[in-house]
Amino acid sequence: METKSTNPILPGTWADPFVLQHGDSYYLYPTKDCPHWRHPTLYAFQSKDLLNWRGPTGILDLANIAWADKFAYAPTAAYWQGTFYLYFCADNQIGLAVSDEPLGRFADILQRPLIGRDAFGCQSIDPDLFIDSDGQPYLLWGQGKLWIAPLREDMHTFAAEPVCLSDQLYRQKGLDPAAYERDYRARDNDPYAFDLRLYNEGAHLQKIAGRYMLSWSVYDARDPRYQIHYAWSENVLGPYRMPEHNILLAPTETMRGTGHASIAKKETDYYLVYHRHGSVVPERDWHRGMEWNGIDGTDRQVCCDRIKFRDGEPVQIIPE
């Protein structure tokens, strides 16, 4: 039976939702919004139906992390070989914590970042853990660039060299990734700039009907134009190809900043769980983006909508 949500599905300001299904329950791991995204704690919610959520339950506090004390956000979780694994952002690095229970508490097992600040030529944020149907786990991450790497059984050692999936998107557009990145930064006079219109952050990988569906967010999270695009591949490492119309979710007149999502399956249906801005920016002011007076992307709300498919392609979601 279709789940018809009334958005937002969580009370208060939350963002960057990741949903894990385990047993007969769903567990939602979000970011707690606050000024400048400096919150030191991660939380989780629990649901039986994707609609009614219990929580929040504190699952990890940076007071117990030796290498970070702020910017706890964008976690991802998985259950693998009897253990729950939580990959999370802290101080613009990625850490790994484990627990015997989905609601924690989780403990840092490395006592150091798994992926350090600015490693691999991009911002080390927004991890996404994907476990393929053959049991092989993969970690995706990156803002500005998107990387994927298979993991060994310890869940923190790369089993092979990471592959840059965002480079595949640039090549599909006929662009040389390195040259385009260099020229774009020169035009912007910013050595850390990326073209956020093609790929920015918040990647998520889902296997649907035997194919790999990769989704991600474009534009800045504070920008009212923030939205979700997607691509398909027959192989987990690509190449990923974007259809001509590859918008999965885009803002409307009343819903802005719709992005950073994960996908949950309920029975035979798939649901997009994402966040939106709590404040509405008039469309005439969209070009002002993150500089819009008073809108800083810290009043976000978590929403859920069913993904409908037509001829094997997702129909663009119109958020309500």
Image (cartoon, rainbow, N blue to C red):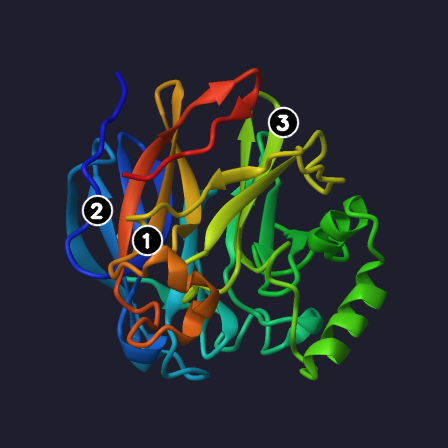
Residue 279 at least partly seen: yes
The reply to whether discs 3 and 2 touch (Cβ–Cβ < 8 Å) is: no
Residue 25 in which image quadrant: top left
Which image quarter: residue 299? bottom left
- Provide the secondary structure element on which disc 3 rests: strand
Q: Split into 4 quadrants, where in the image is the C terminus?
A: top left
Q: Nearer the viewer, mark 1 or mark 3?
A: 1
Q: Pick whichever of labels 1 and 3 is earlier in the sequence.
A: 3
For the residues labelled 3 and 2, the Cα–Cα distance comes to 30 Å
- Which quadrant would the N terminus be assigned to in this image? top left
Which is more N-terminal, label 2 or label 1? Answer: 2
What amino acid type is highlighted by mark number 2? Pro
Please tell me which of labels 3 and 2 falls first in the chain.
2
Count neighbours of disc 2 (C-alpha within 10 A) and say few if under 14, some if 14 to 19, many if 20 or more: many
Residue hosting label 1: 276
Please, what is the three-letter code of the amino acid marked with disc 1? Arg
Residue named by callout 2: 8
Q: Residue 79: give x, y in percent of width and height.
A: 42, 44
Q: Please rate how many residues cluster around mark 1, counting C-alpha atoms within 10 Å: few if below 14, some from 14 to 19, many from 20.
A: many
Q: Position of residue 295 (x, y in %)?
A: 31, 71
Real-space Cα distance between discs 1 and 3?
Answer: 28 Å
The residue indicated by pointer 3 is 211
Q: Amino acid at mark 3?
A: Arg
Of residues 205 and 9, the one drawn nearer to the viewer in this rendering: 9
Q: Residue 181, position in %: x, y?
A: 76, 68
For mark 3, does the 10 Å Cα neighbourhood hold few (<14), some (14 to 19), or many (20 or more) residues? Answer: few
Residue 70's place in the image compared with 23, above or below, is below
Image-based side of 219 in relation to 185, left or right: left
Residue 196 sits above or below residue 48 on the image: below
**Residue 177 at x, y = what percent?**
80, 60
The structure residue drawn at horizontal position 64% and vertical position 54%, both measured from the top left corner, is 198
